[in-house]
């Protein structure tokens, strides 16, 4: 993504982290962006402006999830984030982030570029946000895109591993914390 824009009152978007290891048999990217919205807005549209296509197929080939948090710290620039990838034969997707503050919520975003399979998460994580699935399957191009979230905030700062317990895949993944206000 080269930039993120929105309708309504313009927000200042910040790239938190991207995971874009490439190679002859590697596809896709994952990125995390954030913005503070100081006044409530409704019916805004958010658009990711591609710097380049992530695969040689006609768009749309991925997913863009916009997640709105209340009671989050206005400035998320000091929030921790970590990326991981497997461009080899496949492993269980995992990314570990070391949170920096109490009551942080940890999320992960991932792209399995080889298969269109629903991820399986441990009991303390979910792939639904506000009751809606955050998994996008693309069986034509063999991709899975998803967001997963801890089911409860961390009470004490420390290492949090976001992972998929099955199946093993080739993947890009980013885990990051959302700081509490």
Image: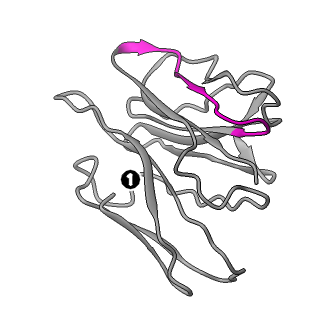
Residue in the foreground of this view, choosing between 35 and 54? 35
Quadrant of image for the N terminus = bottom left
Residue 89: x and y, percent?
A: 35, 12
> How packed is label 1: few (under 14 Cα within 10 Å), some, or many (20 or more)?
some
Residue 119: x and y, percent?
A: 61, 29
Q: Is residue 166 above or below residue 3?
A: above
Could you tell whether 113 is left or right of 79 in the image?
Answer: left
181 drawn magenta: no
Residue with the mark numbered 1: 61
99 drawn magenta: yes
Q: Is residue 106 above or below residue 42?
A: above
Tell me how the rendering is colored.
one colour
From where the camera sits, is residue 49 visible? no
Q: Is residue 83 above or below residue 36?
A: above
From where the camera sits, is residue 100 visible? yes
Could you tell whether 152 is left or right of 170 in the image?
Answer: right
Q: Which residue is drawn at the image coordinates 46% and 41% (left, top)?
A: 139
Could you tell whether 111 is left or right of 107 in the image?
Answer: left
- The span picked out in magenta is 89-105
Q: Quadrant of residue 9?
A: bottom right
Q: Which residue is drawn at the image coordinates 19% and 29% (left, top)?
A: 23
Q: Which residue is drawn at the image coordinates 30% and 61% (left, top)?
A: 2
Residue 38: x and y, percent?
A: 66, 76
Quadrant of image for the C terminus = bottom right
């Amino acid at each position: 993504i080269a930039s993120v824009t929105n309708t309504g009152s313009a927000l200042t978007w910040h790239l938190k982290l991207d995971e874009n290891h490439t190679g002859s048999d590697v596809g896709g990217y994952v990125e995390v962006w954030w913005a503070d919205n100081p006044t409530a807005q409704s019916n805004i549209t958010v658009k990711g402006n591609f710097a380049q296509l992530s695969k040689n197929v006609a768009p749309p080939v991925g997913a863009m999830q916009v997640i709105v948090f209340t009671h989050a710290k206005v400035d998320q620039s000091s929030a921790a984030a970590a990326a991981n990838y497997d461009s080899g034969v496949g492993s269980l997707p995992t990314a570990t982030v070391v949170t920096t503050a109490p009551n942080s919520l940890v999320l992960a975003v991932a792209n399995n570029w080889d298969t269109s399979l629903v991820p399986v998460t441990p009991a303390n994580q979910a792939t639904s946000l506000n009751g809606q699935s955050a998994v996008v399957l693309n069986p034509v191009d063999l991709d899975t895109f998803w967001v997963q979230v801890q089911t409860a905030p961390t009470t004490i700062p420390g290492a949090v591993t976001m992972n998929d317990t099955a199946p093993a895949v080739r993947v890009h993944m980013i885990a990051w914390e959302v700081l509490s206000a």
